[in-house]
Image (cartoon, rainbow, N blue to C red):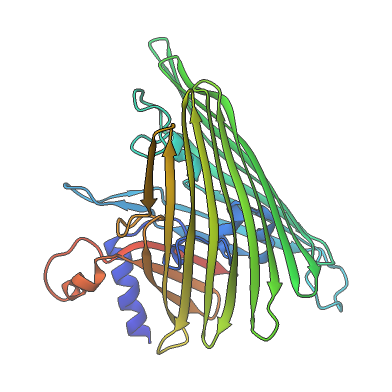
Amino acid sequence: MRKALILIMAAGCCIGSYATDARVNSWGKHDAFFMDEVSIFRNPANISIYPNMVYGSYGKLSVTDSAPVVEDPFFGGIVSYSLNEESDAGGQYPMLSVGALFNRYDEMLDYVTKGKADYLDATVDLEKPLGKVDFLLGYVFKEGVMLGGGAYVAIQSKEDQGELYETKIYKGNLGMNWPVAKTMDLEISLGLGTITAISANTAVAQQDYFGRGEIRLFSALAGVNGDFVPRARVDFLKLEEANKLKVDIAAGLGININIDKGFFWSGLEFLYGQDDKDDDAEQNVGGKISFGIERNVLWDWFLIRVGGQKSLILKTVGPNEKEWWENPSSDETDKDLVGLGFGINIDNRLHIDFVASEMIPFTFSNLISGEQKYLFSRVSATYSF
């Protein structure tokens, strides 16, 4: 076991990886219908589900013609303290949790990062925000109701020959996880933020605002060890300078089931999007089906995961343009079709998760001989203490 573990970790660490949560990326590309550590960034109340934990990822490996470049690694942790003064009660609630994570790439940075599809204005160069940090606070009442608050900050400001270059993102979240019944948990989160983007005294965005709301209900399924999960979310972005309003809505139903030595989930969602800019309006209507499965293989400490998603959307631009869009099949992004990954679980405390490169079935022999680019696309790890 020790030799196998060393070989797997050496392959993942030496070759490189992408950041964000590796388990989710290999397991259906999103976590809409199950609970995972990545949900703490949308609903800070969930940090109470993962008390006393450190969390980190290597970063994004951009493969270029010259040399690979690692971008946006992050790390942080959650510390929890039980306020239960009754030593014979046997419970840890009420409990207070505090968390901080550093350098995490938030999805809102896509609007101010050149080269991203959502970049605000391709005609200007915006400064890359620095000091990216998450602050999280959670509290659990004795009855089990969880509340939480979170903040995210990424900023940069400089002057060059009298010209101002400024990029700022401020984001706040409030969340609740409430056991409304013995077999039912209700999760609600709300977020608001502002975005400022100025290049050479030209304001692309000036304290414009964005927001998000999400609700999920985990209801135990009778007869199986799992949950039925209805879910809905809405995102919006309002840019006054560009006269732009962007709205994204998703609503769907999912299930997750504990199977023998593993876990399975699946979901079906309705998607709606609207992107209005001046007189140019774009509307998107469609749906997405997704699934994920993981299982222990050979050893209790070794897991294999596979998952996928398929989106089909009708895009309407103006009165005369319509076309169907589907998510890419194999570009190794969070929107592509399938994922494959591996997990290491040591005493249910140390978790190391790898996402396999989509070329790994064709390049695995290069571990012994030959030349290849990389075997894994993402790696993340958590440790509970």
Q: How many tags in the picture?
A: 0
The residue that appears at 44% across and 76% down in the rendered structure is 344
Front residue of 233 and 1: 233
Location of the C terminus by quadrant is bottom right
Front residue of 198 and 68: 198
Tell which residue pokes out farthest to the top in this image.
162
Vertical side of 295 occupied by 93: above or below: above
Front residue of 347 and 33: 33
Q: Residue 110: x, y in percent?
A: 44, 40
Position of 259 with respect to 85 (left or right) is left
Position of 160 with respect to 278 (left or right) is left
Residue 159 quadrant: top left
Vertical side of 325 occupied by 318: above or below: above
Q: Residue 104: x, y in percent?
A: 49, 48
The residue that appears at 51% across and 20% down in the rendered structure is 241
Q: Residue 350: x, y in percent?
A: 51, 73
Location of the N terminus by quadrant is bottom left
Vertical side of 127 occupied by 106: above or below: below
The residue that appears at 42% across and 9% down in the rendered structure is 162
Residue 177 quadrant: bottom right
Tell which residue pokes out farthest to the front in this image.
320
Residue 238 quadrant: top right
Position of 29 with respect to 34 (left or right) is left
Q: Residue 76: x, y in percent?
A: 54, 55
